[in-house]
Image (tube, coloured by chain):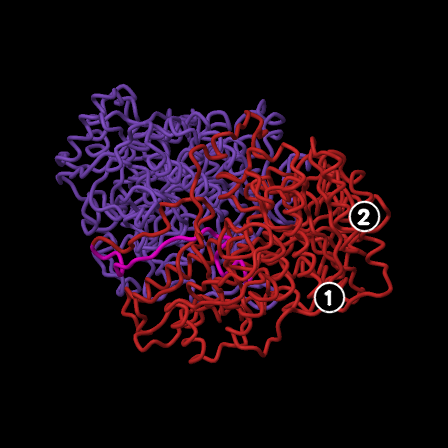
Chain colours: A purple, B red
Amino acid sequence: MKLITEVASEAGIDERHLELYGKYKSKLSPSLWEDIKAKPDGKLVLVTAINPTPAGEGKTLTTIGLAQALNAAGVRTVAALREPSLGPCLGMKGGATGGGKSQIVPADDINLHFTGDIHAVTSAHNLLSAMIDNHIFQGNELDLNPQRIVWKRVMDMNDRSLRSIVTGLGDGNGPVRESGFQITTASEIMAVLCLCSDLSDLKKRLGRMLIGYDQQGQPVTAKALGAVEAMTALLKEAVKPNLVQTLEGTPVIVHGGPFANIAHGCSSIIGTRYALKLGEVVVTEAGFGADLGAEKFMDIKCRQAGLAPSAAVLVVTVKSLKYNGGVPKEELYNGNRVALLSGLSNMERHIENLGKFGVPVLVAINHFEGDSSSEINEVVVACRRLNVPTAVSKVWAEGGAGGLELAEELIKLLNREDQPKFAPLYEASLDIPAKISKIVREIYHGADVAFSPAAKRSLAVIDRLGLHHLQVCMAKTPYSFSDQPRLLGAPEGFTMGVRDITLSLGAGFAVVITGNIVTMPGLPARPAAEQLRIDDEGQLQGLV
Amino acid sequence: MKLITEVASEAGIDERHLELYGKYKSKLSPSLWEDIKAKPDGKLVLVTAINPTPAGEGKTLTTIGLAQALNAAGVRTVAALREPSLGPCLGMKGGATGGGKSQIVPADDINLHFTGDIHAVTSAHNLLSAMIDNHIFQGNELDLNPQRIVWKRVMDMNDRSLRSIVTGLGDGNGPVRESGFQITTASEIMAVLCLCSDLSDLKKRLGRMLIGYDQQGQPVTAKALGAVEAMTALLKEAVKPNLVQTLEGTPVIVHGGPFANIAHGCSSIIGTRYALKLGEVVVTEAGFGADLGAEKFMDIKCRQAGLAPSAAVLVVTVKSLKYNGGVPKEELYNGNRVALLSGLSNMERHIENLGKFGVPVLVAINHFEGDSSSEINEVVVACRRLNVPTAVSKVWAEGGAGGLELAEELIKLLNREDQPKFAPLYEASLDIPAKISKIVREIYHGADVAFSPAAKRSLAVIDRLGLHHLQVCMAKTPYSFSDQPRLLGAPEGFTMGVRDITLSLGAGFAVVITGNIVTMPGLPARPAAEQLRIDDEGQLQGLV
């Protein structure tokens, strides 16, 4: 590892703008923004993927490897990634810092507490929670309806026992009511942190967050609780982007990590803006597959930030394509041309969809050891047929060197003269049902949308409060274009069931809940935490 | 503020041993210990106080001011303090970084997230909590009794609604059981962090922590859950001491902050050891008054660490003495010689008690604006009569310069040839009831101890498990020597009621609970959080 001061210096960042966290991590001071804001922006490239499968696609890996490869090819590149959440690291998922020769480092630190951003979100969130119950306890001046508090508590841990709880039991312990915990990355504050443009905007957004309703059914926001300044204070460091590096010394801004279902699943706007001033190219990623991640990246993040992505890299693997073609997880190591060809329908649809945003697509075939060259060739052929550039990526095994072909294809794509023009999918002026319908028809290729009674009640509230200007944040299973996780490939004609619609007024979107969305994961029978080892010198094994 | 690199350099710490957190905070690397461990220890001075009153005594203030004064007097001095907990900062108490011209800085950062140590304790604690419920959910191989889990969850927030909760409601959300949250500083992990000698000892202690009992009534420890390595990993940075400075540039190690009732209320042993190698004198403090704080400092911290304090500074104010003499809070500004003389009984008893540990005492009269000189003189006279050195301290108004007289008296005391010999109050070989009885009779001056049925059941468990070697950690109201908060002054002849005894096996003590001990504070009607302000540049107002 280079010292982070050296990584910064190579990226053109003067040391006075660094706020070091040890020798290998740094926050970037707002003074840096003053220094660089007049520079022209680099080109923004989104790494996305086909619908995720148990085989793993390698989106983060590809983002890191591609950034290394672009630098190796002489293009000054910065990666912009999400911060790993502790809960999943210790639960099922393990670390989220790439793998093989394409990793961000120091991986253990980044996977554990990093620079404390997620802890700060937890504190700010739970301060508001405590102040809500305390407000009721101390006399309830705002006439809050204890049964209609929508603001829960959060913890960065996979703890299913906290999903549904009753609080305030015992004498003098506040109002007895049903509530629960979400994982911190599902906090609206995380979404707000990632969408705000600065501390002042952060404060305004925090104030707008809906915490519940009063006895007259009127919405009550965080501002009314008097918590907003303190919450902003708790987030004053978290709002500063973090600088780390890849194994090859490529600068990486790792900042923010909102849930990809009930939130938009992208790293912070502030971090992306810094990266765009520092790199000729910025490689970033979004959660889940392109139906969720890329759509929200374009329609929420890019729209709110005024960003226009120049290209999208769609990550596929032969295994995940076969899975989408109906092969069960256990048989993915076997060749299966028929299933592969069938699964390609999933890739083709994502390519078609990305075109609707006016963003050119490059397919990255993430190579796994043991992949057959004939199967890889089928993917190449399919891309050629669609006139979509493609390259095999071996960044896990080879680092940047294994991504040179991908980098070259990307550079060609970025330099094409006939650039399409980026535009979000839906107009802001459409009402919420029309926005939902547009996404369901044009991205998911469903036939219809069915609103549950609860969703209809929520729409009535949206009507009454005049909130149709909000963006739409789809909370849907990532495994299928539809709301049915087992409907793989490229399903059509289904009806999308909307179970409920909740309001993230600080983030600026309405969350459209389809299916059963769990915002607090549980631990598996053998949590990843059990595999961790630490020696007397503090060296870890088993986290990544 | 000096750069922390400069503060370190002046304290003889090479920059390679620093792990910076911004420009003004640093963790001290274990490599520093290797460098300094052969040096002789400085002298350890405990700052303690009479029983706390609503008037405030200024123990932290005096610790900081005295360290500044000693440095001004040419004695190389390091202060060792506890880390403020976020919950109380945002609740009732406000910041905990001193005041006036005797503060540690950067105060806002220290009061908020600091270097993330408390967040790390929260994460480690709640990982274990989640793994316990997950273990039961996944089949309960250990045959845990869900009704006898003693390990709760923690949060660094004042949130009374979480004191008593039911978890696991709903389908598939784990076992339904009663549980609750404590504030993080009440976590046994915080006590363990502060009592361990290094990472390896930390791991052993974490493994010994009692989490509950199985269906056969046998104790189950954290080790059985497979969580210990991961918990240690989460704490690997938290175990490193933090270096900051006072307003006058005196080096201060701020590390750890266990509750002062159900835990021992002192900063970390590791931090104290580092400080003793860096300073000729180390000034440190303990929670609450000397009956609780000093007793636990001597009997728990010093015994476990093999430390021998050279002196104790007992902080008094004329207001707090008058309060102990029966004057209500509102009338403390008025002169009241009779009440003052009566309240001096409290000071006298603390002086007598400290003598039982073989530690010489110096009385610091912490001067408040408006204190009458005749009242201050009464205190001086009382100390002379007892042959105890004393000095008026004006460190709030004047910083180190206002503590020079106190520093001089301390230096004289430390240089006295007839040094008493430090010894803990009770022998380790006494059984738990005998240890309790000795503290109650010799420190509290009570006549008897009455064990409740629950406490007797706990004693039976202690018998059965052979745990009489444990130290005793008294959880008692801090406001009185007795278990009755309103019994001020120097009560005698009372019976101390022991409500329960719980086991902190990792920390190495049995917690003796007298009265009603709340381990999760609540917010007041007007939380301190409401007073906080932050501007667009991130500058805070209203925290300290």
Residue A115's label in the rendered image is none
Vertical relation: B43 (above or below) A422: below
Residue B286 picture location, percent across and down? 63, 54
A448 relative position to A195: left or right? left
Q: Residue at position x 49%, y 40% from top?
A: A255
Q: CA distance from mark 2 to mark 1?
A: 21 Å
User: For the magenta stretch, what is the residue range?
Assistant: B171-192
- In this rendering, does residue A281 appear at all? no
Residue A467 lies within the magenta run: no
For badge 2, the amino acid type reads: Ala
Q: Circle 1 — which element?
A: loop
- Which residue, given by chain and number where applicable, does mark 1 sit on? B358
- Which residue, given by chain and number where applicable, does mark 2 sit on? B407
Residue B57 picture location, percent across and down? 64, 43
- In this rendering, does residue B249 appear at all? yes
A61 relative position to B147: left or right? right
